[in-house]
Each structure stands twice: as structure tokens, then as C-alpha cells.
Amino acid sequence: MSSEIFYDIKAVRIPANAVNAAEDVYVLCFLQGSSNTYAYNGQRERKWCTPFIGTFDDVMAHQISWLRYTLYWKTYGRSGEVPEHLWLAKIRKALESAEVVVEIIMDDGSMQVGELTFKPYRLCDGMTIRQALCSSMERRAQSNQPGYSDWDVFRITGPGQN
Amino acid sequence: MVNDLDYIKLSFSELPHFTTSDSWINYKFNEADTSWMIFALEEREGQEPQWRRIHSSYWGSNHCMYGIYKKGAAWEAHMGQRLVRGKKVPVEKYLDFRKLSTTQISGLGVLRPVSSKTICESNQSVLETYHGHHWDKSDWEVVGTDPLGPFRIPLSSRANLAFVTEVDGPCEIFLETPQGDVAVLPSATMDLFTNGGV
């Protein structure tokens, strides 16, 4: 049996006016990997991904709904199951310390925010960053299951991945 | 707006054991040894307070705490729609229910856990027999005329608990008085909170 291990959490914040939203939009990013999937160097696979894009409360709602799963956290040698309240505290901290995106870089096919690089892919392949964000939020607004995840919007590269 | 006046974490391990010839049913009955439910004494505007289940240990039931996007007690607490004794608390603090110590049914005083359970149409076949086990419905009460329920099922046996937790369908669970009153004055049950209140 495998479990998902979370190594790092980051978030970036998009100003509301950049995507015609009522509130600022957050892109939540996890460095994560399966406990039984290994890279060529023998290290457990670690990839950056985007579980959710939305307002502060949307992201919190999505992560509250994740609490029904057991969540694992591993960093700097410390590891183990994370209690629900600590997981939410990590998410809140990531959102509150999110790096703000400068609007001008959003019309490119990729963007660099801090140490992370975002490139639209799969559902949003070929779009600009702004188009990918708008398209993701539009899909959510029209969906009858607004709590679904956003795994297929951005490919993210950054430190720690292998 | 909901105001949580108090909480209780109920254990079912003291329910009498019994075994059947089916190992799966035995496994489900034995789950009562580790099952728990958390009830909140909820105060809603214009209504008497009532004890309602807001969380449980078994899979699927955690929807009532945080299993569905933008629904459940934790989400309500995050949005300030659910208060704890009149105060808004961060959702991380709201989840302090993990610190509650468990109470057995015999420690509930006059209160008893009772479910209101409706069966999904696709599960109609298990209403009579499940893995060869015939449900004893002698203490069930049918509310209305629909054969799929709701049924009022007291959680007074491992079989009743297994039915409520195993068979799919909408379910609410309350702590009621022997007269079937779900409304309970906080002062009437204050003796329950000498241990482990949040």
C-alpha cells in the first residue's frame, strides 16, 4: 500500500484585477510524491503540482475536504501523519505568506514566481498564464462539482523535485 | 448561524458482543469496539438546543465534519457560521475535538443515541438481509409510509450500529431523551462535562 508524502507547501497570489475576479486568487502548490514511486537515483519521486486554484476561502474549503484522508508530511528527517489542525495551519501559513505575482508576466506562456516556474499544460496547453487561470476559474464556476482539483492546469518546476 | 454549546465524544465499545456465522458481519459488529461519534449541543436561532452528530470515525460519515466541499461543521466554523459558545474560532482551533475523552452510552444519563436513517433505493435488498444476517428491527420505528424510510433506529446494539454505518443512505444521529425529545436544555446535561470538554 502506498501513501502520498508531502515535502513542501507554497502558494502564489494573483491580484484580483489581473484575472477579473472579485478577490485575489491563490495557486496552491505541493512538492509531493508517492511513498512507493522512485526516481532513477533511488530517491522517492518528488514533483511540484497544483491541487487547487481559487480564492483564500475556496482553497481552505478544498483543503478542509481533504482532511478525510490521512495526510503525511516529511521534511528534514522528521516525518509522520499530520493532525488535521496542523495541516490546515500549514495551508493557512502558505496562503498568508504567498508571493504576489506581478501582472505583466501573466501574458507569457510561462512565469517565474520566486523559485517556482509555472507552465500551462494538459487542459491548458498552449495558453498564456492568464488564460489558464481564467479558464480554470470559469470551469469551476460552471461545474456542478466545484470542489474538484486542478492537477491538469500547470506544470511546475522548482527546488526539491527529482 | 449555529452556536455549539458543548461536545461529547461517544464510544460504543460497551455494547454487548455477539457473533454470527458470517465473518464479514462479525467484523462489522466488532468495529463498535473502536467506533466513536462526536455530538455537538447545537443552538440555532428560534430552536431549542439539540445534540446532533457532527463527526464520526467511520468512512463516509466524516462528510458531516469536512468531507464535502464547502459543507460541514469545519467549513461553517471557518466561515464564522458556526460559533463555539458564542465565539468565532479559527477552524484549526475548532478541530480541538480531538482532545475530547470518550464517554460510554451508560455515561450519558438520560440521553440515548438515535439515528434517523433513509435507505438508498439501490440498497433496498439489504434492508432485510445482509451477508446472510437478518436485521432485528424490533426496536426500529418507521416514520411515514415510505418503505425506504426514514427509520428511527436506536444505536443500542452492535447490529443497529452496523446497519446505520454500513448501509448507504442519508443519516442524522441525535442524542434524545427516553421520551424522544431531541431538544435538551444545556443545564439538564451539565453533569456530562466534568471531563474533557473542549
Image: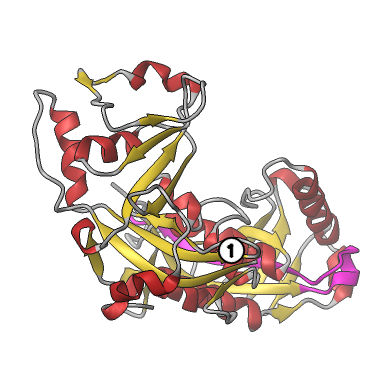
Colour mode of the rendering: secondary structure
Q: Position of residue B145 (x, y in %)?
A: 51, 21
Between A36 and B135, the residue placed more toward the observer is: B135
Q: Residue at x 67, y 43 (%)?
A: A145
Identify the residue at horizontal 35%, vertical 21% (top origin): B127
Q: Where is residue A136 in the image (x, y as percent from the top left)?
A: 76, 52
- Residue type at mark 1 is Trp
Q: Would residue B33 appear left or right of B183 to someone viewing this image?
A: left
Label 1 packing within 10 angstroms: few (<14), some (14-19), many (20+): many
The N terminus of chain B - image quarter = bottom right
Secondary structure type for disc 1:
helix
Q: The residue marked by circle 1 belongs to what chain?
A: B
Q: Residue furthest front?
A: B179
Task: Say which quarter of the image contains residue B155.
Answer: top left
Q: Is residue B149 above or below residue B11?
A: above
Residue B190 part of the magenta-drawn span: no
Q: Where is residue B95 in the image (x, y as percent from the top left)?
A: 44, 71
Taking A146 as reference, is B139 above or below it?
Answer: above
Instruction: Choose top left, top right, bottom left or bottom right for residue B76.
Output: bottom right
Q: Mark 1 points at which residue?
A: B75
Residue A49 seen in the figure? no
Residue B28 vertical placement versus A107 (above, below): above
Report whether A49 appears left or right of A120: left
Residue A35 among those drawn in magenta: yes
* Residue depicted at 55% across the width and 57% down the height: B72
> Is residue A27 in sight in this rendering?
yes
**Left or right of B75, for residue A117:** right
The range drawn in magenta is A14-36
Q: Is residue A56 above or below residue B123?
A: below
Viewer-nearest residue: B64 or A92? B64
